[in-house]
Image (cartoon, rainbow, N blue to C red):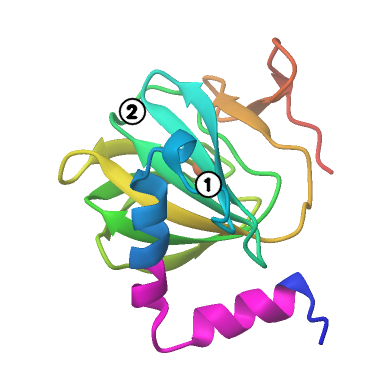
Amino acid sequence: MNRSIEELQRAWLNSEDWQAGLRAVYELGRQDTAASPASLPVRIRQEVMGPHFAKYHIEGLPIPAVLHYITQAEPHADPHDHPWGFTSFVITGGYEEEIFYSDGTSILESHWYGEKHRISARRIHRIVRLLDGECWTLVLPDPWERKPGFYRWDENGQPLYRPWDREDFQPLQSE
Ligand SMILES: [Fe+2]
């Protein structure tokens, strides 16, 4: 039976043993992938995002899944949004997230080990503090939605934006 990625993701998220599934995925992520047996049905592909943030794409699962490994918060980074919405599971540690409104004001939310939460593609945020050392999360992305980018605000609270692949910030045009 062919099921869509969305159906599989929904079924998995709704299953009562999702924490057991998370533990299994976490153990896979800890393995030295070069030493993994050839028969292992999944492969881990590393994507280094910066000195304190790496992604581990888990390839071969019926749904897209990515481990995020964060060793240091970036409280002064330009806030960003995303190409897709996603569900995030905090596997170890926790983090404090700063979420921005369109006028540049923000709120803080803490996410601890064991939490599951949804993040929309349009959420503008950054991680400002790790709550208990290094943090692993498992991210299950939705389908691609939009081109992501970075934000700043001028002294009048007007948003400035640059697409992720551009260098310069420009006044944000409403979409
Ligand atoms: Fe993000």
Question: Residue, x 25% and y 37% (percent of image)?
Answer: 129
Between discs 1 and 2, the one toward the N terminus: 2
Quadrant where the C terminus sits is top right
Residue 17 within the magenta-colored segment of the rendering: yes
| Furthest residue in direction top, as rendered | 167
Give percent across and percent down for residue 6.
72, 74
Q: Amino acid at mark 1?
A: Tyr
Question: Residue, x 41% and y 89% (percent of image)?
Answer: 16
Q: Secondary structure at mark 2?
A: loop
What residue does disc 2 label? 75
Q: Depth check: 37 or 17 in front?
A: 37
Give percent across and percent down for residue 10.
62, 80
Give percent across and percent down for residue 37.
49, 48
Q: Depth check: 50 or 98 in front?
A: 50
Packing grade of label 1 (10 A; few <14, some 14-19, many >=20) is: few
Quadrant of the image occupied by residue 112: bottom left
Where is 15 relative to 63, above or below? below
Where is 142 relative to 137, above or below? below
What residue does disc 1 label? 101
Q: Secondary structure at mark 1?
A: loop
Find the magenta span and give its range: 6-22
